[in-house]
Image (tube, helix red, strand yellow):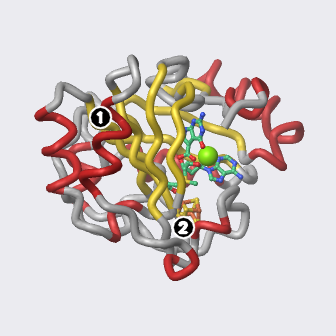
Amino acid sequence: MEHFYTIQGEGYHTGKAAYFIRLGGCDVGCHWCDVKESWDANLHPLTDTDWIVQQAEQYPGKAVVVTGGEPLIYNLDYLTSELQKRGIQTFIETSGAYPLSGQWDWICLSPKKFKGPQPSVQQHAGELKVIVFNKSDFAWAEEHAAQVGPETRLYLQPEWSKADQMMPLIVEYVKNNPKWRISLQTHKFLNIP
Ligand SMILES: C[S@@+](CC[C@H](N)C(=O)[O-])C[C@H]1O[C@@H](n2cnc3c(N)ncnc32)[C@H](O)[C@@H]1O
Ligand SMILES: Nc1nc2[nH]cc(C(=O)O)c2c(=O)[nH]1
Ligand code: SF4
Ligand SMILES: [Mg+2]
């Protein structure tokens, strides 16, 4: 759908330069999704994988974030092996709604109520990033934390439109439950892609 070199705005790798590859297509249906234009894959022309790998290679930041849409709709074995062959680290942003494919240096699992995560993704998640839209999402976040490994980093990220209301609750929650950290969509404050 689109590709751009920017700064990872969210989660564990926040602040790191990375080339983003956004794949079109998602059927998870989050009502607050900030990239709804990605949902219909047919609206976005197909892009040659070798060409996109060549683009990624042009930049000094040797990390690629594969996102979407829901990137795990597709088999990502070829894309990730071609990137890693060139010394580029592979990171993914996924809801986990489809089985894991690809070789990943970092998996960010952001589970969704609308279509739950697959065990193959839960097992390999470097971070669990739960979006907090209302108060009940804290208990829901704990349910998902119990399903990932002990090494998985835990993040609570406010849903963008609810951030003003939810942020005080998230701050109190993390003060009382310090296994969690706060993730903000810093690129939106920085006005960068
Ligand atoms: C657009 S999604 C694409 C990747 C994948 N479909 C997923 O949901 O993880 C990228 C990240 O943005 C988060 N996100 C989407 N809409 C958001 C919003 N309105 N506020 C905060 N985070 C949001 C998702 O939870 C996910 O972590
Ligand atoms: N800068 C920046 N960081 C991001 N981290 C995750 C994003 C996404 O949409 O998957 C995203 C994005 O769209 N921009
Ligand atoms: S799974 Fe990701 S891309 Fe799909 S609707 Fe939800 S936030 Fe948007
Ligand atoms: Mg985004």
Is residue 154 shown to the viewer in this render?
Answer: yes
Query: Which quadrant would residue 100 be assigned to in this image?
Result: bottom left
Please state if 185 lies on the left or on the right of 60 as rendered.
right
Which residue is tagged 2? 113
> What SS does tag 2 mark?
loop
C-alpha distance separating marks 2 and 1: 23 Å
Q: Is residue 34 left or right of residue 46?
A: right
- Residue at image position (57%, 73%) is 39
Residue at the spot 23% in from the left edge and 33% down from the top edge: 105
Residue 192 spot, x, y in % from top left: 71, 31
Residue 21: where, in percent of width, then height?
44, 48
Q: Position of residue 131 (x, y in %)?
A: 61, 48
Q: Residue furthest bottom?
A: 42
Q: Residue at x 48, y 21 (%)?
A: 17
Q: Nearer the viewer, mark 2 or mark 1?
A: 1
Contact (Cβ within 8 Å) of mark 2 with mark 1: no
Q: Residues within 10 Å of mark 2 (few under 14, many from 20)?
A: few
Residue 155 vs residue 59, the one in the foreground: 59
Q: Nearer the viewer, residue 119 or 10?
A: 10
> What is the secondary structure assignment of the residue under circle 1?
strand
Q: Residue at x 72, y 24 (%)?
A: 171
Is the C-beta of the residue carrying label 1 under 8 Å from the nearest atom of ligand 2? Answer: no
Residue 118 picture quarter = bottom left
Observer-nearest residue: 59 or 175? 59
The residue beneath circle 1 is 106
- Specify the amino acid type for callout 2: Lys
Q: From the viewer's side, name the closer residue of 24 and 9.
A: 24
User: Which callout, 2 or 1, points at the residue further toward the start of the chain?
Assistant: 1
Which label belongs to residue 178? Answer: none
Counting every numbered tag in the picture gives: 2
Q: Where the C terminus falls, by quadrant?
A: top right
